[in-house]
């Protein structure tokens, strides 16, 4: 503990609430945060269970919000988004559920086109040299788009 207060279950719960006031956390990340604050495993588990039962801590909600924000911001898509959710400690079944929901609601081609328009306005695949083509394709792949989808968009049109 940082101060002289005892590591009580109530204190762990209150610390968890303070953390959640700033941003969402997964159950796994919350466990780690509370453990690093000096709470023992039993106290951490009790606080996490209480936060979950009262609706403050929810992995499904975290996965859906994180995925929606990442896609809307053009940061992560597809496999990269799956990797980032798992890195945050979201259980595999909730990752797949969140990604499935996004696949139903969004069109990968539209998302790819949007990223291209924002990041590479006026890019013309036929007119670009090999180095520039590789740079653009690599950027889009790092974002999580598949090579097939990338090439389909790049060869089909000049980005406005």
Image (cartoon, rainbow, N blue to C red):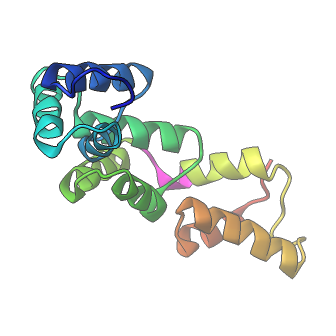
Quarter residue 7 falls in = top left
Magenta: predominant secondary structure element?
helix
Quarter residue 37 falls in = top left
Q: For residue 114: magenta?
A: no
Kindly identify the residue that appears in the image at 90 percent across and 77 percent down. 129
Seen from this angle, which residue lies furthest bottom? 130
Point out residue 109 in the picture as x, y percentages from the top left corner.
Answer: 54, 55
What segment carries the magenta color?
106-110
Q: Is residue 66 above or below residue 109?
A: above
Kindly identify the residue that appears in the image at 59 percent across and 45 percent down. 74
Q: Nearer the viewer, residue 38 or 66?
A: 38
Q: In the image, is 108 to the left or to the right of 63?
A: right
Point out residue 54 in the picture as x, y percentages from the top left corner.
Answer: 13, 20
Point out residue 59 in the picture as x, y percentages from the top left corner.
Answer: 24, 40
Is residue 56 among what the camera can see? Answer: no
Q: In the image, is 124 to the left or to the right of 115?
A: right
């Amino acid at each position: 503990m940082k101060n002289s207060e005892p590591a009580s279950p109530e204190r762990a719960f209150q610390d968890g609430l303070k953390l959640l006031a700033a941003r969402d956390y997964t159950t796994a990340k919350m466990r780690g945060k509370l453990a690093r604050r000096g709470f023992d495993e039993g106290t951490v588990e009790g606080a996490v269970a209480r936060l979950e039962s009262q609706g403050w801590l929810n992995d499904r909600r975290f996965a859906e919000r994180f995925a929606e924000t990442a896609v809307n911001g053009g940061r992560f898509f597809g496999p990269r988004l799956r990797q980032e959710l798992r890195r945050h400690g979201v259980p595999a079944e909730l990752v797949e559920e969140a990604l499935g929901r996004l696949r139903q609601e969004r069109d990968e081609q539209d998302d790819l086109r949007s990223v291209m328009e924002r990041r590479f306005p006026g890019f013309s695949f036929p007119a670009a040299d090999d180095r520039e083509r590789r740079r653009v394709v690599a950027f889009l792949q790092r974002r999580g788009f598949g090579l097939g989808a990338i090439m389909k968009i790049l060869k089909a049109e000049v980005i406005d």
